[in-house]
Image (cartoon, grey):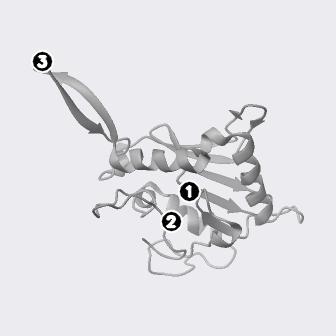
Amino acid sequence: MLLSANRHFHRLLVGGVPVQYQKDGETRGDFVRLIDWTTPAHNNWLAVNQFSIKGPHHTRRPDIILFVNGLPLVLLELKNPADLNADVWKAYDQIQTHKEQIPDVFQTNEMLVISDGTEALLGSLSADPERFMAWRTIDGVTLDPLGEFNELQTLVRGVLAPAYLLDYGAMRPDTRRGATGSSLPQAGGRA
């Protein structure tokens, strides 16, 4: 059910929301774009730390949610690097708990990021642990530009920066005829 709602939203995100309006006494149809794909700066960008979300039985606070035009598109779950018991997979487990307890925030999700301060991995809503991958470039050319132990900064600068986030195959409208799905680009480079 969650994946179905997420796929429906993705189609609206990339294709536009169908609307009807009256003009010259006639009912007309068109599509409203939720995002300005051509000029990222025209969108409203907001990163919120510890945003409280009330689910049916629980209130949870994901570590960081990135909103574009008010839509929660990216969720980051971060673990303390000083806590030896809190690795990147604890962040993954926390996202699974969030999916169960606050599923509504995932209906519009396009990307998930998990990190323990050393390791940082990128995945999609339906990704199993094996499908979460490191991102190793900022410019799409140079690998590990910030050096060892800077995976989170590389991922943030190379994927989540407004100039790049809307440019990925997972989010960008696909102009191929009949294309309806989405997937994240392979780790390490641009889509």
Extreme-left residue of the structure: 24
Name the one closer to the observer, 107 or 115.
Answer: 107
Give the residue at x 44% y 54%.
162
Give the residue at x 10% y 20%.
24
The answer to whether 36 is drawn above or below residue 168 in the figure is: above
> Which quarter shows the C terminus?
bottom left
- Mark 3: few/some/many CA within 10 Å (<14, 14-19, 20+): few
Q: Position of residue 168 (x, y in %)?
A: 43, 63
The residue tagged 3 is: 25
Amino acid under disc 1 = Met
* Residue 111 badge: 1
Q: Secondary structure at mark 3?
A: loop
Give the residue at x 68% y 61%.
114
Q: Is residue 31 left or right of residue 138?
A: left
The answer to whether 86 is drawn above or below residue 185 in the figure is: above
Q: Is residue 166 left or right of residue 150?
A: left
Amino acid under disc 2 = Leu
Quick one: label 2 or label 1, which is nearer the N terminus? 1
Q: CA distance from mark 2 to mark 1?
A: 8 Å
The answer to whether 38 is drawn above or below residue 12 in the figure is: below
Residues at marks 2 and 1 touching, judged by CB atoms closer than 8 Å: yes
Q: Is residue 150 visible?
A: no
Q: CA distance from mark 1 to mark 3?
A: 43 Å
Q: Position of residue 178 (x, y in %)?
A: 31, 60
Q: Is residue 64 visible?
A: yes
- Mark 2: few/some/many CA within 10 Å (<14, 14-19, 20+): some
The residue tagged 2 is: 184
Q: CA distance from mark 3 to mark 2?
A: 44 Å
Give the residue at x 37% y 50%.
14
Amino acid under disc 3 = Gly
